[in-house]
Image (cartoon, rainbow, N blue to C red):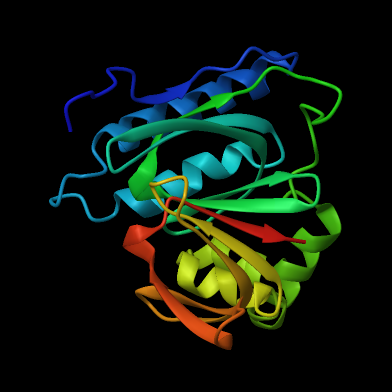
Amino acid sequence: MKNVKKRIGISSPTTSLPRNEFIELRACIEEANHILQTLGNPRTPENPRQLQLKLASLIGKQVKAEISFQGKFKTITGILREVGKNYIQLGTKNVKRYVMFDHLISVAMNAQDDHYPQHQKNPYFNEKLNCEILYNFTDVVSGSVKLLNRFYGIPLSVALLQDVGKKIRIKQADSEIIHSGILINTTDQAIIIQTAKQEHGETLETIPFDEIEVIRIQN
């Protein structure tokens, strides 16, 4: 790859948070920055899980993610809704987008605007839910994909199973290559969607994860 960006990592936010909360958030961002820089190091296989935990501090906040796929760079924005074992999920109105860690260059706090409020409640910080987890951990956690992801980390192939039956658009590096249809299933290596092609009627397509830039799902 000829054009490699020098800035890699997560930039520190400018917020109106109380001083203690801001210091804690900044520390998480700095640690995630370091993890992003070493993500490709085969001697540190725990890095993706560490990155997930650090990025979880930004859930509910508007972010700007810079990604690189097959030598092409782009920026996407939205509310960080979820961070999995190997992906982030950004929400914009009625659409959620998935990007894998392998394509992620940096994540930065985005400027506040009217469309995407800067501060939203983190779904994991809920006093009632915390009590339920404390007294009935197994039943509460096993019954929620979000909580399973938070405590153990689930890959994108598993996370997408909750969207089976929904409309999906899959973008590859070339802007002209866009697969659209209904999400049918996933495997460890690929997504299976049902498409409608006029000449052949409905057909199934299998798209490998390593050929995907961004996944868009209609809520």
User: Left of 98 or right of it: where is 124?
Assistant: right
Mark count: 0
Front-lying residue, 69 or 44: 69
Looking at the rendering, which quadrant does residue 199 occupy? bottom right
Q: Please provide percent x and percent y for residue 185.
A: 54, 83
> Could you say where residue 58 lies in the image, as x and y percent from the top left?
61, 36
Please tell me which residue is depicted at 75% across the width and 13% down the height of the picture. 16
- Residue drawn where x is 64% and y is 12% of the image: 14
Where is 41 relative to 45, above or below?
A: above
| Vertical order, 136 against 176 (above or below) | below
Q: Is residue 30 visible?
A: yes
| Residue 92: image location, x then y, percent | 74, 43
Q: Residue furthest left?
A: 43
| Residue located 74% across and 73% down the image | 135
Q: Quadrant of residue 37?
A: top left
Q: Is residue 118 left or right of residue 30?
A: right
Q: Is residue 142 left or right of residue 12?
A: right
At a point 23% along the width and 37% down the height, the residue shown is 38
Residue 154 visible to the viewer: no
Is the residue 168 above or below the residue 75 in the image? below
x, y percent for residue 104: 40, 40
Front one among 20 and 97: 97
Q: Quadrant of residue 150?
A: bottom right
Q: Quadrant of the N terminus?
A: top left
Please state, as top left, top right, bottom left or bottom right, where the C terminus lies in the image: bottom right
